[in-house]
Structure formats: C-alpha cells, structure tokens
Image: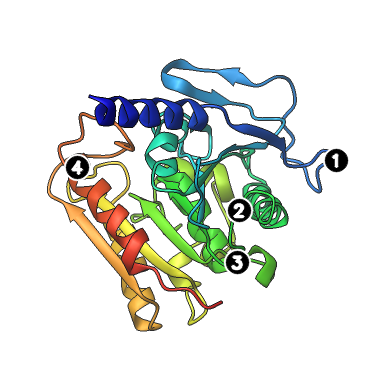
Amino acid sequence: MKVISFFIGLFISTMIFAQQPIEISLWPNGMPNSNGLTGTEEDLEGGRVANVVNPSIAVYRPEKSNGMAIIMCPGGGYARLAMGHEGHDMAAWFTTQGITYVVLKYRMPNGHYEVPLSDAEQAIRIVRQHAAEWNINPHRIGIMGASAGGHLAASLATLYSSQETRPDFQVLFYPVISMKEGVTHAGSRVNLIGEKPSAELEKKYSLEQQVNAQTPQAFIMLSSDDGAVPPANSLGYYEALLKNHVPATLHAYPIGGHGWGFRDNFTYKRQWTGELEKWLREGVTFNE
C-alpha cells in the first residue's frame, strides 16, 4: 500500500506541476512586424482562440528534466488556434517523460506571411536563452505543429534565419505543407499568402521545395482519410526529406480524418503516442 500511495502521490504532484505553466510574452519590447489586426483576443468554442494580439509561450516544466524541449504550434487554418487538444492538453503527457513542453500562441498572418514565422523564431530563441535555467540542453529543442501549425513548424524547420532559431527536430501532425492549389488547404493558403500570390511566394511556402540537407530530422503522422488536408502534403515532404538524406519517419493511420490532436476518440491514439514516445527516446539523434 505504501508503494501504491507513493506512486499515486508522485503522479498527482507531477500533474499539478505540469498544469502550472510559466507564461512569457514573445515581444515585451514591441513587435518587429504587424499583421494589421487590433482589438482584443477572442475566446471561441472548443478551447480555440482568435485575434491573438499579444503572442506568448506557456512553458510546462517537468519535475525532472531529460534535457529535451518541444515547442507546439496549434492548428487552426492560420485563422485561429486550437489551444486545447492541439496545445495545452498534451502538457502532462510530455512532462511525465521529462520533456519541457512549450505551447506557442502565435499571431495570425492576415495576409502578412512573415508574422507567424517571426513568432516561432522568437519562441525558440527564448527557450534557448532560458536553457540553463530550465535544465534544457540547447541542442535538444524541437518544433511541433498540427495542421496549419504543422506548416508553421515545418516553416521554422526549413526557413529558419540562423542557427539560433534552427530546431533540432520536428514533429508534424497531419500538416499543411504545400501552398500549391489542389494540394494545399485552401483556407490556410489564402490566410497566409493571399488569394493571388506570386509564383515566388507560393514556392517559398511550399515547404517540400525548401528541404535541404540541413533540415532537421522529422516525425510525421496523419490519417489516410484526411479530407481537409490531403495526405499528399505529408507524403511530398517525406519524400523531399529522404531525397536530401534527412532522417524521417512517417505514420499513416487508415482512419481518423483531420484534427484529432490529443483527443481520446481518435482510434489510433495509443499507437501514435507510443510511437512518438519511442522515437523521442530512441529515434532522435543530436549533434552536440
């Protein structure tokens, strides 16, 4: 009974610790760019938020860090953010593994394509700046994203501006990758680069065309029956990674549609959580 009580107490303390994030503003001294949106943040149904005007990160620290950190970019078509099942709901699962888990609340592009990526770059800068304080290895920081948030995560992995903002690995849930019509998610494309983007801009944010040998290793997962973001997005990115000799793994589950995140009603939740946990523990390699 004493052993059981000890582990119950440990689990509860871990859960409580994980549920108390550190909130940090991305740009306390002013933002470097604008998306033209003003007003106040909007709380929508299902844990979603819109009109983010004060981007920030929520940092969930484990009781005992293994040195790894992951920054999560929730999805929402570059119009809103699913902060629950594609954000905060995963905190305890990561922190019990010893991983520092960071949820990024980023600004919407509103046609200003540079805005979300600038927020993602600032998020990883902040995490690296606090690495010693938070018991994180600055060379073991990954980016993760779902749907349009997956596009932002893959943008950071391919379009990072310096080694300071290059992630060490990437984890993508059913990501938007391409901006090509017929492959992309139409809403994400319009919100990010507009209805009639130049060919150059479309190519820049078609991330399967931006992969090179320095792109960080990747874990990609999706459902084969995704009717919102065609599987061709993930498949094209996976092929580009392999072509450039970047370590990558892809898991395609037969059913599930789009947007499952950490929801329990996804049939293959036990599979993806087990496979990702093993990959983070054994499949990621680091150059330190």
Q: How far apart in space, not on screen, are marks 2 and 3 (Cα)?
A: 19 Å
Above or below, 287 against 12 in this view is below
Q: Are marks 3 and 1 in contact (CB under 8 Å)?
A: no
First reached walking from the N terminus: tag 4 or tag 1: 1
Cβ–Cβ under 8 Å for marks 4 and 3: no
Instruction: Give the spatial CA distance, label 4 vs label 1.
Output: 42 Å
Q: Nearer the viewer, mark 4 or mark 1?
A: 4
Q: CA distance from mark 4 to mark 3?
A: 30 Å
Residue type highlighted by circle 4: Arg
Q: Tell me where residue 56 appears, x and y as whole percent.
A: 67, 36
Closer to the eye: label 3 or 1: 3
Instruction: Identify the residue shown where x is 39% and y is 47%.
Output: 97
Label 2: state its secondary structure.
loop
Report the residue marked by disc 4: 270
Residue at the (32%, 35%) spot, across then down:
262
Amino acid under disc 1? Gly
Q: Earlier in the sequence, mark 2 or mark 1?
A: 1
- Category of crowding for the residue at label 3, using alpha-carbon neighbours closer than 10 angstroms: few (below 14), some (14–19), many (at least 20): many
Badge number at residue 166: 3
Helix, strand or loop at disc 1? loop
Q: Earlier in the sequence, mark 2 or mark 3?
A: 2
Of mark 3 and mark 1, the one earlier in the sequence is: 1
